[in-house]
Amino acid sequence: MTKLELFFGGNIGAQGGVSEDDWRRFLAEEVTPRFPDGFSVVDADGQWRNAAGMIIAEQSRDLIVIAANGSSESAKIASIRDAYKMRFRQESVLFVQSEVCAGF
């Protein structure tokens, strides 16, 4: 199977962070319709270097989806990444894809 992960930064500038209500709304509107069979979310503390060269430490969320090998999920992932970046004014959303052994 294929493991798809998206890492979403939580800082949104002067407004602080993405609220729980905003996050739940994002999941309901953007993620659930694209992956109705299920996914997991893990809270994380992340750090990265932005385009200006500054080190940014922030609370993050790791969205994990397990999909069948050979399924084409790239358009769904791209749509979710674009929606998050636009909605929460993010420079980047990390995407990781790896093959895993999984069963349900």
Image (spheres, helix red, strand yellow):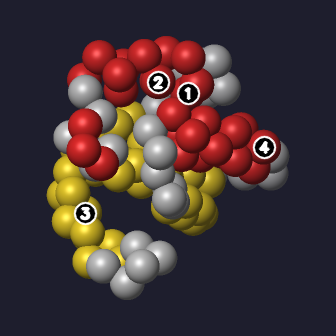
Residue 68, position as x, y percentages in the image: 69, 43
Is residue 38 toward the left or the right of residue 12 in the image?
Answer: right
Name which of mark 3 and mark 4 comes first in the sequence.
Answer: 3
Q: Quadrant of residue 33?
A: top right
Q: Quadrant of residue 86?
A: top right
Dots 2, 3 in contact, CB < 8 A: no
The residue lying toward the viewer, choosing from 91 and 65, is 91
Please say whether residue 4 is visible from this viewpoint.
yes
Q: Residue furthest front?
A: 14
Residue 104, position as x, y percentages in the image: 49, 33
Q: Which mark is residue 46?
A: 3
Dots 2, 4 in contact, CB < 8 A: no
Name which of mark 3 and mark 1 comes first in the sequence.
Answer: 1
Q: Amino acid at mark 3?
A: Gly
Dots 2, 1 in contact, CB < 8 A: yes
Q: CA distance from mark 3 to mark 4?
A: 25 Å
Is residue 47 toward the left or the right of residue 63 in the image?
Answer: left
Q: Would you name the residue on which mark 1 appears? A: 31
Is residue 17 toward the left or the right of residue 84 in the image?
Answer: left
The residue lying toward the viewer, choosing from 73 and 68, is 73
Q: Would you name the residue on which mark 4 appears? A: 75
Q: Secondary structure at mark 3?
A: strand
Q: Would you name the residue on which mark 2 appears? A: 26
Q: CA distance from mark 2 to mark 3?
A: 20 Å
Residue count near mark 3 (Cα–Cα under 10 Å), binned few <14, some 14–19, many ≥20: some
Name which of mark 2 and mark 3 comes first in the sequence.
Answer: 2
Q: Secondary structure at mark 4?
A: helix
- Labels 2, 4: front one: 2
Q: CA distance from mark 2 to mark 4?
A: 17 Å
